[in-house]
Image: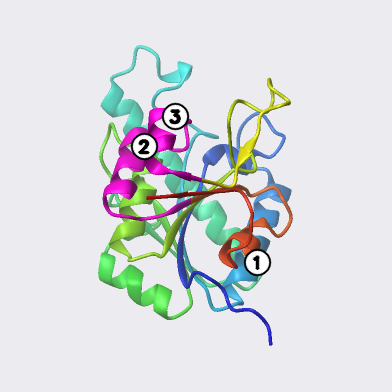
Amino acid sequence: MSKSPKYRRILLKLSGEALMGEDSYGINRATIQAIVKQIKTVVDMNVQVAVVIGGGNIFRGVAPAAEGMDRATADYMGMLATVMNALALQDAMRHIGLVSRVQSALNIEQVAEPYIRGKAIRYLEEGRVVIFGAGTGNPFFTTDTAAALRGLEINADIVMKATKVDGIYTDDPKTHPDAMRYSNISFDEAINKNLKVMDATALTLCRDQKMPISVFSIFKEGALMRVVMGEDEGTFVHI
């Protein structure tokens, strides 16, 4: 008898940078196809998937490009970048037969539905992927915080942060080859050691609401499925 998934409803946080692949900016088609293929694998296992996507591959409010700009204006531009990524993700999903809906925290009704919690939950129950764009809809909040917030709102079992690194390490594995990967770590330890799992607001929100986080590499073949199955993949952050 095959093992069933450990999690039935997940919130997947994808950074905008993840969509770049090896490119210096924008969206790499092969990379986005590989990501949606992993998502389809878990959807085919009847796992309900919601996605929060960043916009750093196009524009980031705290990047050098935003220097001298009003911070709120720069953040709104970043939110619009996340909607562009959400539409690209939706299009890639359509090509492989995945039905998805884009909900935006900013009203852009010609291209995306407004975020409505009840609708999002209904879509998930119907087996559709829900992609949340425009972060929280507010400046000064990151898409990490949006992921924590939406994960809690839709009653997800876990927030999964997909990155370029396969978990949380004791030090930067690029500059310190001897750095060790944590297989699991407590929220307090991650916060106290300033391990840059997610920004502090997102981390504290998840800790206070007892929402576990998994940090893993989306570039490892089958990694998302292994996390969903509860296998030792990436780093598990818990109370």
In the picture of the structure, the residue carrying the numbered disc 2 is 142
Marker disc for residue 31: none
Of residues 111 and 98, the one nearer the viewer is 98
Label 1 neighbour load within 10 Å: few <14, some 14-19, many 20+: few
Q: Residue at x 40, y 56 (%)?
A: 111
Mark 3 → mark 1, Cα distance in angstroms: 28 Å
Q: Please say if the residues under marks 3 and 1 sit with CB atoms less than 8 Å apart.
A: no
Q: Residue at x 68, y 20 (%)?
A: 175
Q: Residue at x 45, y 21 (%)?
A: 63
Q: Position of residue 97 (x, y in %)?
A: 63, 73
Q: Quadrant of residue 50?
A: bottom left
Q: Position of residue 135 (x, y in %)?
A: 35, 45
**Left or right of residue 113, residue 3 in this image:** right
Marker disc for residue 60: 3
Observer-side mark, 3 or 1, equals 3
Mark 3 or mark 2, earlier in chain: 3
Of residues 106 and 178, the one nearer the viewer is 178
Mark 1 or mark 2, earlier in chain: 1
Q: Amino acid at mark 2?
A: Thr
* Element type where label 3 sits in the image: loop
Label 3 neighbour load within 10 Å: few <14, some 14-19, many 20+: many
Q: Residue at x 26, y 71 (%)?
A: 118
Observer-side mark, 3 or 2, equals 2
Q: Give, as a single range, the part of the protein colored magenta.
A: 185-213
Q: Position of residue 218 (x, y in %)?
A: 64, 49
In the picture of the structure, the residue carrying the numbered disc 1 is 95
Label 2 neighbour load within 10 Å: few <14, some 14-19, many 20+: many
| Residue 151 is at least partly visible in this image | yes
**Left or right of residue 227, residue 71 in this image:** left
